[in-house]
Image (spheres, rainbow, N blue to C red):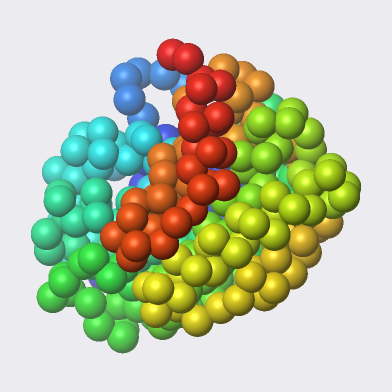
Amino acid sequence: MDSAKIAIIGDGAIGSLVASGAQKTHIPFRFLLRGDRESVLQVTGTERQTIRLTPTHFDRLNDNDLLVIPVKHYQLADAIRQWHPILSNSTAVVLLQNGMGGEAILSEYLKSQPVYVATTSHGALKTSPLQVRHTGLGSTLLGRSQESTSAAYSSAKDRQVTELLCQCFPPVAWRSDIRFALWQKLSVNLVINPLTALYNVPNGALSEPRFSDSITRICDETSRVMNALGYSTTQEALEQNVRHVISATAHNFSSMHQDIAHKRKTEIDGITGYLIKQAKKSGVDVPINTALYQQVTALYEP
Ligand code: KPL
């Protein structure tokens, strides 16, 4: 059996970390890019060591290879439409992005492939079109997508995908309840991303008393929606976790803050927009999230 290869859609910050890990562990990798342009060349680690990336060229992915999709929420449909033809029927696909709702988009194109979803707390920043910096060590949780009914799933496949991803993006832990983990990450993004973007502040500023009431109300609405969907949690538990992330990432600017600062489209539809959709389905009122959605949407005028 050939050694496994990894293809990564785009050359964003997190995808480049996966690439640098693949290079360190001698796993052949390539970026899948739109058009003919140079991909990220250098990744600087948390200890300031720099790796120069040397991707390999291959055209197709086989059964034991992996496709990693770390693109922005709004890029997902185009990305999978373009790249799904290079997959074999059993190539595993890992969706690694902020927000939720992406699994349903993938299921339109990936009828036979086993799809996995992951959430990570690693921090990374694209400092120039060809350079990425690993800004904070974190960990990644991985599990099967609920939207996929692939016949290629097996516990051996789950283990192979976990081990392969762990080799290049450690540590990775398997979660059979990955959706709960995704909701927990969503609850963090629901608070930090819109507030930092709207008030133009780093994550740590959200520990100031002026944000307290909003944080509590966002977590309260999120916990109501989660409970209505069968995920047992409380406003207090969500808020405690959000406050932990605020202090652990105090000096970072959130991805939504950076998107607004650079006049780019945001992931608000996959974050607050997703919550609002789920709230509607479950008959829960989410007024503060609705207001934040409208305010963030108004900030970005294409
Ligand atoms: O995921 C993040 C983001 O910026 O999108 C957090 C956890 C908020 C860290 O900045």
Nearer to the camera, 247 or 11: 247
Q: Position of residue 20 (x, y in %)?
A: 58, 47
Query: Residue at point 31% right, 84% down?
Result: 156
Above or below: residue 100 compared with residue 10:
below
- Taking 158 as reference, is 186 left or right? right
Above or below: residue 282 compared with residue 156:
above
Indicate the quadrant containing the N terminus: top left, top right, bottom left or bottom right. Answer: bottom left
Nearer to the camera, 266 or 296: 296
Query: Residue at point 60% right, 64% down?
Result: 220
Q: Quadrant of residue 241?
A: bottom right
Q: Quadrant of residue 40?
A: top right
- Residue 249 visible, this angle: no
Above or below: residue 147 compared with residue 77:
below
Q: Position of residue 251 (x, y in %)?
A: 83, 43
Query: Residue at point 24% right, 49% down?
Result: 105
- Residue 180 visible, this angle: yes
Q: Position of residue 41 (x, y in %)?
A: 58, 30
Q: Quadrant of residue 49?
A: top right
Which residue is outermost to the right? 208
Query: Residue at point 45% right, 66% down?
Result: 225
Nearer to the camera, 277 or 130: 277
Indicate the quadrant containing the C terminus: top left, top right, bottom left or bottom right. Answer: top left
Q: Position of residue 205 (x, y in %)?
A: 84, 43
